[in-house]
Amino acid sequence: MQQANHYLGSATRFRIFTAAKYLVYALLSLNVYLFLQEELLALTYTFADGIQPGQLIQAFSATIDTAAWVILLLMFELETSVLDDNKLRGGLKWVLHGLRGLCYLALGYAFTGYYDELVTLYQVTPLAVTDACTLVESGYSLLMDLDEYLPLDSGNCVAVGSQLYTIADFGILADGETLRAAQWLAWVDVINAADWILVVIVLEVEVRLQLRGDLSERVMDATKIIKFLLYAVLFACAIYWGFAGDFLDFWDAALWLFAFIFIELNVFEWQHTTDPELADPA
């Protein structure tokens, strides 16, 4: 059984560990809704005249990305903690593989959405106007932060810098400082998404090798080093979001780091309970 709690000690500690794990998973599921709300609000400013099918990923990249990750996380939880190895065969095995395959396609699709948003933030046109208040009646929206907009009005125009840009064809106005901050956040989104894809590739290799009985100590030592570097980048992204004031992204990143700590512990315990060289003597 992969549910053995050799390293977790007492049954009470194991139950606390399990409760904390599933609480994190539940909070991550809630984040799908929170990202959907945020992106639906942004949609009223970015694609106010209607959205084409090819633009859906740019508009809902965070929602699609998070939903795919939640499903993928549950797949890893089933394989590394819930189901016995002898059940991971036949039809169930192919169902899990199929679902994971769809999730990987969604993650790659979401990555292109993050990239498209980054590119869009560099498609800017400088304006000769230096006072945003003169544009209040022109129908512009104002970029406040990445994916956060407000209608330009006489109240917020006074806080806008003198170096003004319009973004792509969206009728969105931004000053130089706000635009640069949004571009940096978009870069962090792209780096974070790419890094998580690499993390899950390494985990996928570990799970496949473990099911075949080929997950040796040497392989695990090598993947530990790789994952340490990858998780360090993810941790840096979370810190940046925290300091940049993007609370939802920071909160989501922190939860995902916790979630994959649980998955890492599952894999470690799984390997220990199935490797005769590591298991306790009878």
Image (cartoon, rainbow, N blue to C red):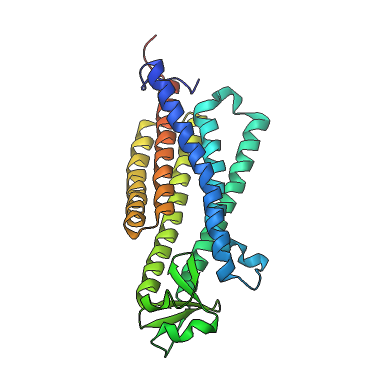
Residue that extends furthest to the top in the rendered view of this protein: 282
* Residue under the image location 41 percent in, 82 percent down: 164
* Residue under the image location 52 percent in, 53 percent down: 35
Instruction: Say whether residue 94 is left or right of residue 31.
Output: right
Q: Nearer the viewer, residue 161 or 77?
A: 161
Q: Nearer the viewer, residue 227 or 13?
A: 13
* Residue under the image location 40 percent in, 53 percent down: 247
User: Quarter-wise, where is residue 39 in the image?
Assistant: bottom right
Image quarter (top left, top right, bottom left or bottom right) of the C terminus: top left
Q: Tell me if residue 238 comes above or below residue 21 in the rendering.
A: below
Q: Nearer the viewer, residue 74 or 102?
A: 74
User: Quarter-wise, where is residue 7 in the image?
Assistant: top left
* Residue under the image location 38 percent in, 87 percent down: 130
Residue 126: percent from left, percent from top: 43, 85
Residue 239: percent from left, percent from top: 32, 53
Residue that extends furthest to the front in the rendered view of this protein: 155
Instruction: Say whether residue 70 is left or right of residue 162.
Output: right
Residue 277 appears anywhere in the view: no
Instruction: Say whether residue 119 is left or right of residue 217.
Output: right
Residue 67 appears anywhere in the view: yes
Residue 113: percent from left, percent from top: 54, 62
